[in-house]
Image: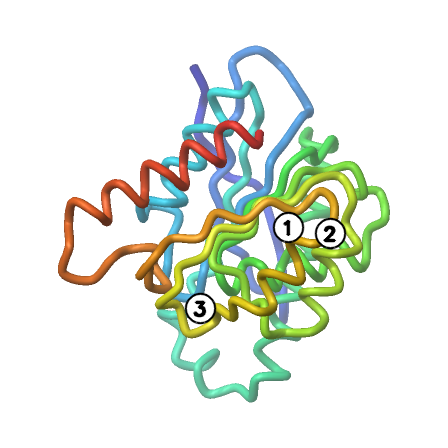
Amino acid sequence: MHSLSSLKIIGHADRPVPNTIYRQKTETEQTALVFPGLGYTCQMPVLFYSIKALLQKGLNVLTVEYNYSRDAGFRGLSREEQIGRLHADVEASYRAAQSQGCSNIVTLIGKSLGTKAIAYLLREHSELENAKIVWLTPLIKDQDLREQIVGHKAGNLIAIGTADPHCDVDILSSLQDNPGISVVLIEDGDHGLQIQGDLNRSLEALSKVIASVNQFL
């Protein structure tokens, strides 16, 4: 069992960062951080069930729900300004977790834009070198993100679909050549890891991804 609340997180421009903290009934500082996509929330299937898997493993879980898709001001920013705001909010979330009873960060899960959040944290915080990382539909065409995946030796799980515009099979192949990197490739899966027009295959894909996440954790 677990309880739900939120942390006080003040991010970019002194704005609060929406979040939910799931705390285990048995006290622990072992924590997972979850970073959703721009429009893919923590209530959507792949993240919803990934959070369930984390809780089942006995971890506290902090979901950082920045909700940029609802912020017209964010959409009007340049790409560089958007990433700068993301970094500020992610840094504030990381520090809040450490200062509010969730200091032992053992797992990070990111979806799409959330994988950029993880890449930032790995680059800036060497104490995360032993954390397990789940990269859901990562932006693997981004060189900095690829470097963080390859440079992280404690274990990486990548899940992506062949119909995702961010997928590149050659890049995936080169990533898989590195130790500690596992890839779940969903044939015909889109950026939501669904197969358009095929409910049964979409459910099978979801089951495959979550089973892989659960085993990886």
Q: Residue at x 75, y 54 (%)?
A: 122
In the picture, the disc for residue 118 is none
Tell me where residue 130 sits by quadrant.
top right
Q: Is residue 95 left or right of residue 160?
A: right
Q: Position of residue 50 (x, y in %)?
A: 44, 37
**Which circle, 3 or 2, is nearer the viewer?**
2
Q: Is residue 175 something that shows in the picture?
A: yes
Q: Is residue 36 something that shows in the picture?
A: no
Q: Is residue 131 left or right of residue 196?
A: right
Whether residue 149 is situated above or below residue 201 in the rendered picture: below
Q: Residue at x 67, y 26 (%)?
A: 30
Point out the image quarter for the N terminus: top left
Callout 2 secondary element: loop
For label 1, the residue is 93
Q: Residue at x 63, y 68 (%)?
A: 12
Which amino acid does the dot numbered 2 rest on? Asn
Q: Residue at x 58, y 61 (%)?
A: 172
Which amino acid does the dot numbered 1 rest on? Ser
Of the pair 158 and 40, the residue shown nearer to us:
158
Whether residue 174 is situated above or below residue 217 in the rendered picture: below
Callout 3 secondary element: helix
Q: Is residue 214 left or right of residue 31?
A: left
Q: Residue furthest right?
A: 126
Q: Position of residue 72 (x, y in %)?
A: 39, 80
Q: How many other residues sit within 10 Å of disc 1, few (<14), some (14-19) or many (≥20)?
A: many
In the picture, the disc for residue 68 is 3
Q: Earlier in the sequence, mark 2 or mark 1?
A: 1
Distance from disc 3 to disc 1, alpha carbons, whole Å, reads: 15 Å
